[in-house]
Amino acid sequence: MRRWIRGAALACALLATGATTGCTAGSTGDADARPAAPSSTAPGSRTPRSEPSRGGEGDARAAVEAAYRKWGLQPLAAPPAPPAGKPLRLRTGAGTVPVISEIPTEKKIVFLTFDDGAEKDPKFVTMMRELRIPFTMFLTDAAIRSDYGYFKKLQALGNGVQNHTLTHPDLRTLGASAQKQEICGQQSRLKDEYGTAPRLLRPPYGNWNEDTRAAAASCGLQAIVLWRESMQIKNMQYQSPTGKLKPGDIVLAHFRGPSELKGTTITEMTANLLRHIHQQGFTVAALEDYL
């Protein structure tokens, strides 16, 4: 696995150059995700978050705000209620798998995603439990197999488990059969470990082609999810020339530790990420509530 981590870091040149986003080699671009008709929540690998009773909402919010102060942060606003109907149409039946980088919304919300799974810092679990920040995990088996249980703790907080392939290859360098093996193999592994088959795929480095879409469909996935911003160590890297967040943006971060983050822990990186979000007047919502 160490060889894989070093290879991924080298391919991204992320920490050495600061010139690219986290594993963000160019993709073939956004595809034809369309607004969806109202529908009920689709099954997936996200455990519903437990909500306080109406009488306890004030106490619960006060506890969250106290937790933010404990972590040296200004509290983010509570996210709005999820929409009654999902704003994007995902693949159903024999349809094409859409490629998504943002969620259409006018609300000042963004969606956090964490990739790979090499770092397994217990303090990150504590931080996310206390702050009640929703996020989606795109997991690679080569990175997580040493401790599947770590991500079960994060899943138990209500966070989604999604597909990031078995071994983190650049899928565009593989033929159709090999892509299917990487994607379907991880579908099976994640279902076995976490109880539900993922609905979403993130191709490593953001690289995909039409074989990727076909493989994703054949493996039962409903969308390919990319991103608009990526979190580095202290700063965010933006695709938009405005250098600012936009409503509905999907943000990429990684399960990385001090050896990859120049001495910074994942909790410190995440605190920096939350500061950027707060400073721009945004809050965080759960991606699976909108897809």
Image (cartoon, helix red, strand yellow):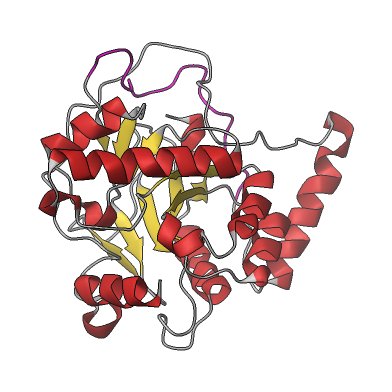
Q: Nearer the viewer, residue 138 or 185?
A: 185
What type of secondary structure mainly makes up the magenta span?
Answer: loop
The image quadrant that residue 158 belongs to is top right
Looking at the image, residue 152 sits to the left or right of residue 216; the answer is right
Residue 123, above or below 138: below
User: Is 94 included in the stretch rendered in magenta?
Assistant: yes
Residue drawn at x 25%, y 14% is 94
Q: Position of residue 190 (x, y in %)?
A: 50, 43
Residue drawn at x 59%, y 62% is 147
Residue 12, above or below 141: below
Q: Quadrant of the C terminus?
A: top left
Q: Residue furthest right?
A: 55
Q: Position of residue 290 (x, y in %)?
A: 45, 30
Q: Position of residue 3 (x, y in %)?
A: 33, 76
Residue drawn at x 20%, y 29% is 214
Residue drawn at x 37%, y 57% is 252
Q: Position of residue 38 (x, y in %)?
A: 44, 11
Observer able to see residue 31: yes
Q: Quadrant of the N terminus?
A: bottom left
